[in-house]
Image (cartoon, grey):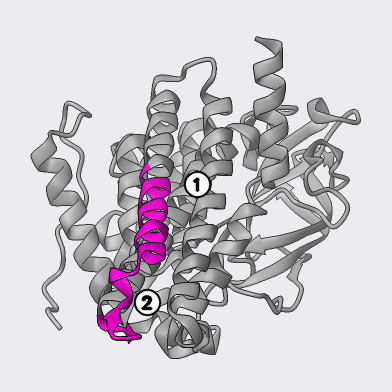
């Protein structure tokens, strides 16, 4: 293996990448995924191993703050550039890439809504992935209805006391920094605030690592806050802004997960294409059978459509267009449905071999299934899109 460090991602001073610069970055990311992710992905899944050492090297490449501003060490890239980067990473391992995107979301929230002091304190180590981040919104009784969270944050002088439980938190127990949504005021969205909670806070603990269908290479635990005292200076963006911060973060998070689906499904499709050329039945290669030709055509077409929809939404998010949230919901719903369908069809084309762990296809199917649920279920995405269209 080549141990020469890959060049770090670095946006030019203009903030806009030329095609040559973008190609160079994607080549570096592609090489990183091929050497650091792909050879280990089955082992990580089987052993439920969270590769902190690899994440640190990802931080050295600039993957810990892809769209964080460069004054705190971020790469300062656009969302359109980020989705291309995350697709190449996910081709190597969609599970670890999905965690990296969540970490990036946490860093972005602090970068966008934090004070100068908060940004200087927390972001350099997050960008380097020396410290890892976790996003804490979902609760046992508040999933899709995020405005119904009950975790409380009560002000006592110069501190807030946080009490409650967060559920399904990626990176919990491994992260150093938790952005926690808690209720500081009235019921509903306007009473929610966001807090930066360090991992060593007294009263902060974690449930056991969940036993999951997929996503085994990243931990998922409950985050338990038992009268956790947080300095008032750790309030992010001001009281009552937590819900809007969370929703704005999720717009990008939905694109990221959509992109992870595309990258993982693209890998599965490539494996299927190789397999149908090599596998002969009834005297001819599977690739010569019309039913297989049609299946591969549909898979490739739908993946390309998903990619274009994600890129369109990323461009809208960069431009802050009024319909950006709707476009992100469209892209997330379509790309995660397509990604799972393509991975599942790739397994079918492999026949019995697709069901075996050694081929890796069944892992990708398991990993991509959850993308239709997290960052807002696809039913909620349809609700967002439908309401937007009907209100037009």
Q: Quadrant of the C terminus?
A: top right
Residue 72 at x, y percent in the picture: 34, 42
Q: Which mark is residue 101?
A: none
User: Which residue was labeled with disc 2?
Assistant: 53
Residue visible at 78% across and 34% down?
192
Span of residues in magenta: 278-304
Q: Is residue 178 visible?
A: no
Front residue of 145/73: it is 145
Residue 71 at x, y percent in the picture: 30, 37
Badge 1: how crowded within 10 Å, few (<14), some, or many (20+)?
many
- Is 253 colored magenta in this rendering? no
Residue visible at 67% across and 45% down?
378
Q: Secondary structure at mark 1?
A: helix
Residue 135 at x, y percent in the picture: 62, 52
Q: Secondary structure at mark 2?
A: helix
Front residue of 111/213: it is 213
Q: Quadrant of the N terminus?
A: bottom left
Residue visible at 44% across and 88% down?
43
Question: Residue 78 falls in which quadrant of the image?
Answer: top left
């Amino acid at each position: 293996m080549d141990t020469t460090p890959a060049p770090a991602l670095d946006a030019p001073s203009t903030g806009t990448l030329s095609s040559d610069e973008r190609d160079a970055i994607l080549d570096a990311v592609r090489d990183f995924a091929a050497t650091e992710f792909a050879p280990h992905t089955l082992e990580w899944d089987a052993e439920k191993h969270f590769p902190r050492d690899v994440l640190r090297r990802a931080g050295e490449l600039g993957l810990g703050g892809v769209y964080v501003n460069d004054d705190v060490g971020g790469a300062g890239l656009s969302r359109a550039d980020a989705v291309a980067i995350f697709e190449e990473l996910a081709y190597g391992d969609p599970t670890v890439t999905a965690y990296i995107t969540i970490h990036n979301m946490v860093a972005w929230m602090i970068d966008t809504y934090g004070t100068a002091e908060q940004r200087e304190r927390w972001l350099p180590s997050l960008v380097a992935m020396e410290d890892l981040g976790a996003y804490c919104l979902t609760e046992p009784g508040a999933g899709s209805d995020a405005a119904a969270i009950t975790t409380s944050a009560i002000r006592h002088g110069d501190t807030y006391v946080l009490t409650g439980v967060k559920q399904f938190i990626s990176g919990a127990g491994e992260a150093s920094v938790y952005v926690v949504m808690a209720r500081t005021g009235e019921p509903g969205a306007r009473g929610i605030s966001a807090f930066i909670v360090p991992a060593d806070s007294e009263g902060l603990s974690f449930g056991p690592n969940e036993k999951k269908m997929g996503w085994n290479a990243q931990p998922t635990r409950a985050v338990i806050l038992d009268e956790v005292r947080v300095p008032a200076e750790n309030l992010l963006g001001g009281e009552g802004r937590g819900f809007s911060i969370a929703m704005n973060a999720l717009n990008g998070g939905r694109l990221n997960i959509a992109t992870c689906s595309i990258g993982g499904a693209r890998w599965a499709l490539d494996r299927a294409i190789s397999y149908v050329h090599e596998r002969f039945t009834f005297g001819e290669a599977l690739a010569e059978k019309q039913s297989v030709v049609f299946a591969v055509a549909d898979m490739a077409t739908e993946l390309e459509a998903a990619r274009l929809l994600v890129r369109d939404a990323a461009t809208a998010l960069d431009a802050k267009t009024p319909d950006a949230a709707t476009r992100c919901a469209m892209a997330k719903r379509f790309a995660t449905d397509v990604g799972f369908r393509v991975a599942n069809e790739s397994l079918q084309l492999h026949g019995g071999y697709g069901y075996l762990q050694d081929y890796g296809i069944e892992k990708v199917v398991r990993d991509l299934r959850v993308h239709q649920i997290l960052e807002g279920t696809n039913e909620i995405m349809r609700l967002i899109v439908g309401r937007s269209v009907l209100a037009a």
